[in-house]
Amino acid sequence: MGVAGFDYDYDYDYDYDYDYDYDYEMTIDGGHAGNTSSRPDSFLEEAATAGPPPGRPEWLDGQPRAVDPAWVTVTRLVGAVWVAVLAVSSLVPVLVLSLVALESALPRALLLLAWLLAFVVLAVLSFLWPVWSYRHLRWWLDSQGMHIRRGVLWREEVAVPRNRIQHTDVSNGPLDRSYGLSSLILHTAGTENASVTLGGLPHTLALELRDLLLEGGEDDGV
C-alpha cells in the first residue's frame, strides 16, 4: 500500500498460545483459598481429618471426659502407703493385747487372724477402689461452668457456676508431679461446695482450665 509516494509493506505473524490451568478451591464463605492444582491429594485428606480449629481445645465440646488414667496408679500408691502405716501402727497394740489380756493360744490366734484378714481386705480395696472410682469420675464444661460427676456407691454431680468462681488453685504432690498430674481446686462464693477439687488432670490441662474459668466475657469458648 502506498500513500503519497511511500510504499509500506506490513507483514504481521503473531502466534499466541495461552494455556491457563487454574483450579481454585472455594471456601465455605465463598472466598478463594488459592491455586490448588499443584497440591497433592494428601492435602485434601489432611483437611478432611483435621481436628478443631487452632486455638480451640478439643475439651471445649461439653462432653463428659475422664481424668488421666495415671490417676489410678497414683491413688493406688497413696492407698498402699496408708494401709502399710495403719498395719504397722495397729500391730503393736494387737500384739500387746494378745499377750497381756488373752491367756490361751486360741484367742490370740483368732485375734491375729482377724487383724490379718482386716488388712487383706483393706489392701484389696485400696487396689480395686481407684479403678471403680475412675470409671465413674467424669468432668465437662458447658456455658454454665464446670460439672463433675463421681461416686462409686453414692453418686453425686457437682455443678460449679462460672459466675460463682472466686479463684482457682492448681496443686500437686510428689507423686502427682512424678506422673505429670495436678489437681484443680475451685473456690466459690457460698457455704455449700465452697471448695471443689478435681484431681487426676494433666498439669498443662489443669493450668488451661484454671485460666479459662477465670476469664470473663462471652467469647471465651465455654
Image: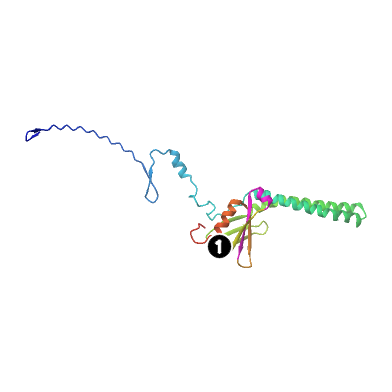
Identify the residue at image location x=68%, y=50%.
175
**Figure check: 112 above or below 10:** below
| Quarter placement of the N terminus | top left
> Residue 179, relative to residue 164: is it above or below?
above
Determine which quarter of the picture holds residue 157: bottom right
Q: Is residue 64 visible from the viewing direction of this image?
A: no
The outermost residue toward the left is 4
Question: What is the residue that sits farthest to the bottom in this orientation?
Answer: 190
Figure check: 165 above or below 94 = below
Q: Nearer the viewer, residue 171 or 70?
A: 171
Q: Secondary structure at mark 1?
A: helix
Could you say where residue 100 lies in the image, as x and y percent from the top left? 91, 56
Q: Amino acid at mark 1?
A: Arg
In the displayed structure image, the side of residue 64 where residue 14 appears, left or right: left
The residues colored magenta run: 173-188
The residue at the far front in this view is 5
**Front-most of residues 130 and 31:** 31
Image coloring type: rainbow
| Vertical order, 220 against 7 (above or below) | below
Q: Residues within 10 Å of mark 1 (few under 14, many from 20)?
A: many
Residue 131 in the magenta stretch? The answer is: no
Residue at far right of view = 103
- Residue drawn where x is 56% and y is 57% of the image: 211
> Pointer 1: what residue?
162
Residue 78 spot, x, y in % from top left? 71, 52
From the viewer's perspective, is 74 left or right of 118?
left
- Image coordinates of residue 184 in percent, x first then y, are 62, 56
Say left or right for 32 vs 61: left
Residue 6: x and y in percent read 9, 33
Q: Does residue 165 show up?
A: yes
Number of callouts: 1
